Image (cartoon, rainbow, N blue to C red):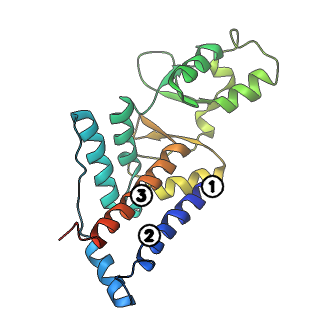
Amino acid sequence: MQGVMRVVRSCHEKLKVTILQHPQFKNTSEMNKVFARFGRVISLPVVHSKEANDIMVSESIMQQKGLENTTVADVLMIKDEEKGNSWLCCRTNDTAYDAIKKMAANNIGSLVVLRPGENQLIAGIITERDYLRKVIVQDRSSKYTRVGEIMTEQSKLITVTSDTNILQAMQLMSEHHIRHVPVIDGKVVGMISVVDIVKAVVDQQTGEVKQLNQFIKGDYY
């Protein structure tokens, strides 16, 4: 998780370097004017498909809001548009084999675990780490071990809501040394990971650097 913090600091440094190295800005007053105007700059990239346009619009809106005002809901929105669903699940009575197979097929590291039945009541989550420690290391059969036996139970879960600030979510993950956090608004609405947060931070800062460069070069007026 320390790597996430380094990414944030690195992105902020890129913003500083972009301004400080540009010959147009020779004093603090001029730099402050740039930042004052930069906060009001809005620019959407040109794309060719509706799906790509929806994603880019969402990312651009998130960039405009800034990390301090970006919420978990913003990240979930982009995940929904990119993957069609921000979370996948299994049931407590599924086998560990089926759960890990589903993770591999979808290139993800965790699944929300729901209780048996049609109601989407969360029972916990299962991660690759759960599988490694409680099945592989203990030499258990994945085809005879139920998800409910190895999952992280609901009572031990660290969760967030959709209106949680993305920086607060990152701090929560860092403090508890976890990589996946379910998003609960009365019921499960999604799952965010360290990868999602890093992507949000990088997209945010990359967008700011790009827009600042465009402003400096006179692309904005």
Alpha-carbon neighbours of circle 3 within 10 Å: few (<14), some, or many (≥20)?
some
Residue plotted at (75% across, 25% down): 134
Quarter assignment of residue 211: bottom left
SS type, badge 1: helix
Residue 186 horizontal side relative to residue 124, left or right:
left
Q: Residue at x 39, y 53 (%)?
A: 71
Distance between the alpha carbons at the discs numbered 1 and 3: 17 Å
Q: Identify the residue position indicated by label 1 in the image.
A: 3
Q: Nearer the viewer, residue 104 or 127?
A: 104
- The residue sitting at 73% across, 27% down in the picture is 132
Q: Amino acid at mark 3?
A: Thr
Counting residues from the N terminus, which is met first, the one under dot 2 or under dot 3? 2
Spatial CA distance of label 2 from label 1 is 19 Å
**Quadrant of residue 41 in the image?**
bottom left
Residue tagged 2:
15
Crowding at label 1, few (<14), some or many (≥20) Cα neighbours within 10 Å? few
Which comes sooner in the sequence, label 1 or label 3?
A: 1
Q: State the image coordinates of residue 103 (x, y, percent, origin top left).
A: 56, 23
Given the image, on which type of amino acid does mark 1 rest?
Gly
